Amino acid sequence: MSEMQENKIRDQVREWLERSWDPDLSLLEWRKRLVEGRWAVPSWPEAWYGREYPVWADEIVRFEILQTGAVSTPIGAGMNLAAPTILKHGGESQKKRFLEPALTGQESWCQLFSEPGAGSDLAGLTTHAELDGDEWVVSGQKVWNTSAHHADLGLLVARTDWEVPKHRGLTYFVLPMNQHGVEIRPLMQMNRHSSFNEVFLDEARIPKDHIIGSAGDGWAGALTTLAFERGFTSLKKPQYAVSNSRVIEEAKVESEEHFKVYSWYPQRAGRIDLIREHAERNNQNTDRVIRQEIVRAIMLYRIGQWTMARARAGRKLGRAPGAEGSIGKLMSSNVARQANKVHTLLAGAKGMLTYTQDEFNEVIAEILISTPAKSIAGGTDEIQRNIIGERVLGLPREPSVDKSIPFRDVPRN
Ligand SMILES: Cc1cc2nc3c(=O)[nH]c(=O)nc-3n(C[C@H](O)[C@H](O)[C@H](O)COP(=O)(O)OP(=O)(O)OC[C@H]3O[C@@H](n4cnc5c(N)ncnc54)[C@H](O)[C@@H]3O)c2cc1C
């Protein structure tokens, strides 16, 4: 990327914003204008709301939009998982039906992958669908589904063929969530938040053409979604200025609602930023053992930042995403674990106290019980190590007994 190219894009979007930003529009009207202006995802193809700019342009354009005080595209499973998966694997009619409402936030999405018996081994899932006339009828159970309780649509992977090996009998559906056959039960977590749900499907109906890719080809789409999930780190809440503008007010409401579910995610990441204050509060900033552990946490964090910077630089040079996704994900688990260790050392038994008057201690207690989730969500640490070993380093694959026989014959409990 040359600086000239970057500056040209910045000038173009600023000039467009000057002409087009209208704070009196509704949020939906504004986002539709953004999509029609081809500034929602400028890296996308011209046929689908884009300008075929390099991938790095998306970040620059988003920055410029927010910098001007305007509103950008929504954050969440629709924009970050559904839209890129449909763009890559969907047919014309799915792209026409689903892309624009995902980019404007008109429809919200959730990811219905994991099951009680299929998490790391996602291809072993047993939720199943059969074609009945013009509809697919789907039954089974999904679990750990973030934001399913307010989603309009679900990214659902289900088994449609039991006679072929497990990866080949899966189909990727778009499930309408608001219907009789879908029961959503929120789960209460040990940190007192309720971000995920169990989703029970009892003969839920899906229109015949709500398939991403083709029947039996769902694994390819699932891998794409998972790759976007690993690379998706930008959970920063947009900071909107105080204003009387309609669109800003609606964007604030949307953002508040969306981030409710994620309010504990900074604690899940370990809160490196609080370590110094924590040590000073407890007068432990001169303890040699604790100082060693603090330095280790900060070192890991910095290395993680460099890995992310390397990934960003690669993208700016137009390189395809590489190993940095898995390495970065693993690194963020290590940072969270080490930060947890430091906060535990500093807090001692007090870290187990909640419902106290001490707000700082409440946050620390939340860090201690939330960081384990970092090593699980979006693929566990062990699975990231398998991916790095097998796909990046080319080590021999894990032995498998169930990849070449019909799924019906695979022993299950
Ligand atoms: C915060 C959070 C948000 C989530 N959001 C969603 C969501 O929106 N939608 C969704 O569908 N799911 C979601 N999940 C679920 C998540 O994808 C699964 O929890 C994850 O894939 C692990 O699956 P599992 O829990 O069934 O554990 P299992 O797969 O049962 O794993 C148990 C343990 O065995 C290890 N293990 C398993 N297989 C291997 C292997 N081959 N080699 C070495 N070790 C192995 C694992 O690393 C782990 O330690 C979320 C989870 C969390 C924590």
Image: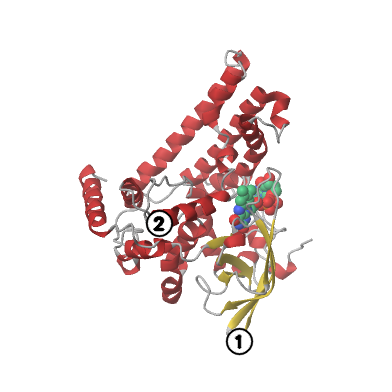
Q: Position of residue 97 (x, y in %)?
A: 44, 73
Q: Pinpoint residue 383: horizontal percent, then vertical percent.
A: 61, 47
- Give the residue furthest to the right: 413
Q: What amino acid type is highlighted by mark number 2? A: Thr
User: Of discs 2 and 1, which sits in the foreground?
Assistant: 2
**Above or below, 406 relative to 299:** below
Question: In what element is the residue under mark 2?
Answer: loop
Q: Is residue 355 visible to us here?
A: yes
The correct choice, above or below, for 263 with respect to 347 in the image is: below
Is the C-beta separation of discs 2 and 1 under 8 Å? Answer: no
Residue at the disc numbered 2: 73
Q: At 54% from the left edge and 37% from the top edge, which residue is drawn?
A: 331
User: For the point 53% across and 55% down, which residue is it?
Assistant: 226
Looking at this view, name the residue that lies furthest to the bottom.
Answer: 133
- Between 101 and 160, the residue placed more toward the observer is 101
Among numbered discs 2 and 1, the one appearing first in the sequence: 2
Mark drawn on residue 133: 1
**Amino acid identity at mark 1:** Gly
